[in-house]
Image: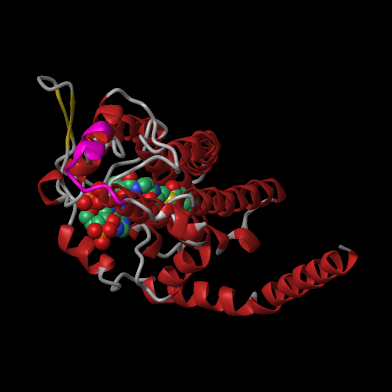
Amino acid sequence: MYAQLVETGAAEGGPEEQAFQERIDRNVQIEPRDWMPAGYRKTLVRQISQHAHSEVVGQAPEGNWITRAPSLQRKAILLAKVQDEAGHGLYLYCAAETLGISRDQLTEQLLTGKAKYSSIFNEPTLTWADVGAIGWLVDGAAIMNQVPLQRCSYGPYGRAMVRICKEESFHQRQGFDIMRALAHGTEKQKAMAQDALNRWWWPSLMMFGPSDKDSTHSAQSMRWGIKQNSNDELRQKFVDQTAPQAAWLGLTVPDPELAWNEEKGCFDFGEPDWDAFMAILKGNGTMNRERLNARNKAWDDGDWYREGLMAHAAKHEAAKTAAE
Ligand code: BYC
């Protein structure tokens, strides 16, 4: 099936590509068996797989707190949320597979460190307030980024986003609720919430990717209708939405440059530390090694289970052949 999908035959820049771009410009979604330029396919595989890996690796920071959630109710909610993230990874791997790459290939790229996943998940979760900050800020940033992706020109990716966005809204609300409880709690709890905001604010802004002038893929991805907005546009929207929420919580955003700009009708804010961002992308964030080791261990630990499934499938297949 994969070989069949990685056809093309048509020259890039030729009539097929023009017809393809016209379809995109008319907002007609592209489906797996439609002709597409090799670059479009490659960009989608890159983005969707990075997105899938982020969902899977993203279980780790919050998973770290499942055994230590402060009540049974918080524990049940967190368990459901972390399971949702695993589900998101699965929808996205399926969407990537429609482009002619197998799930095993994608997994291998993650486990060998060849594929990227979101920088944010290389941050450690030091306190329970970090679980609140992740839901509020990280899932909040994810929604800002993913709502427009529902209109992605590639059908399977856009459709996967519909359900993911619904679940992300619940995740964002649960995170905000944790922050609300802490920020309106004792002095110690409020300090814990503030500390989490201090540590998660800038990494959350980095989730949107480098600034537009340094973004390698944005212009072409927007022409192809994969991305609807630039990285800076979405980062601005996130700040505009989140800064008033922080004020409502009685917390301070750790950015001295954050100020409402009456003339522009939006917030001014400072520049993230892009050198730190690049260091994380190169594998030198606080938790990069631990995250990859954990994924590799999970893969190795699951070997007996995959073997069992294959043995069962082979037995079933042999019985079917014998009966024919
Ligand atoms: N982290 O040209 P650019 C979640 C890379 S999970 C790491 O702007 P693009 C959740 C980029 O890949 C949500 N790498 O790229 C889960 C490129 O490198 P390559 C995850 C980053 O693709 C569990 C280079 O920098 N969301 O919500 O046009 C628990 C240049 O960037 C990052 C998605 O994945 C980064 N932050 O735009 C809780 C959304 N930013 O590939 C929550 C889907 C950039 O050339 N993805 N890079 O080696 C996107 O929307 C886009 O891929 C991005 C980047 C906006 C992230």
Q: Nearer the viewer, residue 29 or 175?
A: 29
Which range of residues does the magenta coloring cover? 9-19
222 horizontally vs 199: left or right: left
The picture quadrant where one finds residue 231 is top left
> At x 58% / y 73%, what residue is drawn?
298
Q: Is residue 94 above or below residue 279?
A: above
The picture quadrant where one finds residue 292 is bottom left
**Does residue 12 show up magenta in the picture?**
yes
Q: How many marks?
A: 0
Q: Nearer the viewer, residue 135 or 73?
A: 135
Give x and y (percent) for residue 312: 79, 71
> At x 14% / y 41%, what residue is drawn?
257
> At x 36% / y 32%, what residue is drawn?
148
Whether residue 23 can be seen here: yes
**Does residue 90 show up magenta in the picture?**
no
Give x and y (percent) for residue 9: 30, 51
Q: Nearer the viewer, residue 127 or 266?
A: 266
Give x and y (percent) for residue 1: 52, 57
Whether residue 206 can be seen here: no
Which of the colour schemes (rainbow, by chain, secondary structure, one colour) is used? secondary structure
Give x and y (percent) for residue 73: 69, 46
Q: Which quadrant of the figure contains the C terminus?
A: bottom right
297 horizontally vs 9: left or right: right
> At x 35% / y 42%, what residue is drawn?
35
The picture quadrant where one finds residue 113 is bottom left
171 horizontally vs 244: left or right: right
